[in-house]
Image (cartoon, grey):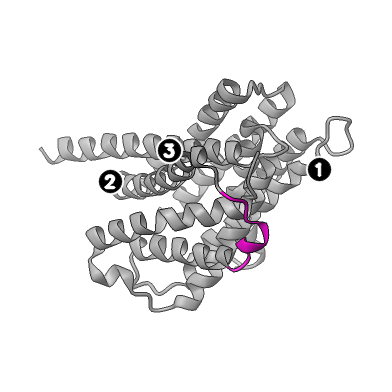
Amino acid sequence: MAAGGARRDCMAGIAAMCAGVACLCVNDAFAKALTAGYSPLQILFLRSLIALPFAAAIALRAGGARALISHRPGAHLARGGLQVAAALLFFTSFRHLGLAEATGLIFVAPVFITALSALVLREPVGWRRWLAVAAGLAGVLIVVRPGAEAFQPASVLPLLAALCYAVLMLSARWLDPRESVWTMQLWLVASSLLLSGLAVGVVWTPVATGDLWAFAGIALFGTLGITLITQAFRMAPAVVIAPLDYTALLWATGFGWLFWQEVPDRATAVGAAVIVASGLFIMIRERRAAG
């Protein structure tokens, strides 16, 4: 009975992860559509504004009133700055790159996390993981093609976003261990709202009535996606759940083709495959090292 329950939890975790990744890809598709008429900063501000009540309600339900309180608000504010930078860079790239290309490049984040863990935090990283880091960077070069006629300077934007995301993930160590994941999520949304709100007036464009549903959608699917992914890691082992994050490439390719008639070229497909393979290898090695 216990084994059957564990299996059901694992399957539920897989379903939650796949659904969460799909929701985040819908979020990205909304963002790409909105960048045609609005600044990425305004998109981020309105997404955070609409998402904050959802995040607060989820935190209250899951963790009670204690989930609203932080022991280190300054650390959350710093993490909010990283979140704002990553989102602005990623959303800006949508104006120049296909959805699948931008998504493939941002998946270099696990490679950056491994490199930063070794170089900054002085954590031991074996030669196999360094080889995977090198392979991931080679995949980036295949997609970006520096020096080639097809090179787009905008390809650097998702890479910088991935770097900010990597630092954001490592910065979780700055937080008080007593704080729950729900507190982290709520304060990340709140700090993103505060920081983006400081400058949004400079780029503000009146929101067309017909676009309100898109702004609501980006907030709803973004919050839902993060919540589902968080739940997935609570229901099933990380070694099973984490690789499913790469299903985002399938969704991004499908949405890009469906809405913008984008078809990734061969170099983008090959480079993305190399990046994914290196990321998966790093995950496997880290699980073995931790076990």
Residue that appears at 36% across and 65% down: 183
Q: Closer to the camera, 29 or 231?
A: 29
Note whether residue 64 is visible. Answer: yes
Cβ–Cβ below 8 Å for labels 2 and 3? no
The residue that label 2 is drawn on is 235
Which type of secondary structure does the marked residue at label 1 adopt? helix
Q: Is 93 inside the magenta-drawn segment? A: no
Residue type, numbered disc 1: Pro
Residue that appears at 29% across and 56% down: 58
User: From this viewpoint, which residue is outermost toward the left?
Assistant: 1
Cβ–Cβ below 8 Å for labels 1 and 2? no
Residue that appears at 40% across and 59% down: 52
Magenta residues (range): 198-206
On residue 23, the disc is 3
Tell which circle, 1 or 2, labels the residue nearer the N-terminal end: 1
Residue type, numbered disc 2: Met
Q: Is 186 on the left or on the right of 172, as rendered?
A: left
Q: Residues within 10 Å of mark 2 (few under 14, many from 20)?
A: many
Would you place residue 94 above or below residue 168 in this image?
A: above
Report the mark closest to the observer, 2 or 3: 3
Q: Position of residue 15 (x, y in %)?
A: 32, 34
Note whether residue 127 is visible. Answer: no
**Quarter of the figure that contains the N terminus:** top left
Q: Closer to the camera, 123 or 170?
A: 170
Q: Residues within 10 Å of mark 1 (few under 14, many from 20)?
A: few
Q: CA distance from mark 1 to mark 3?
A: 28 Å
Residue that appears at 48% across and 69% down: 173
Q: Position of residue 245 (x, y in %)?
A: 47, 39
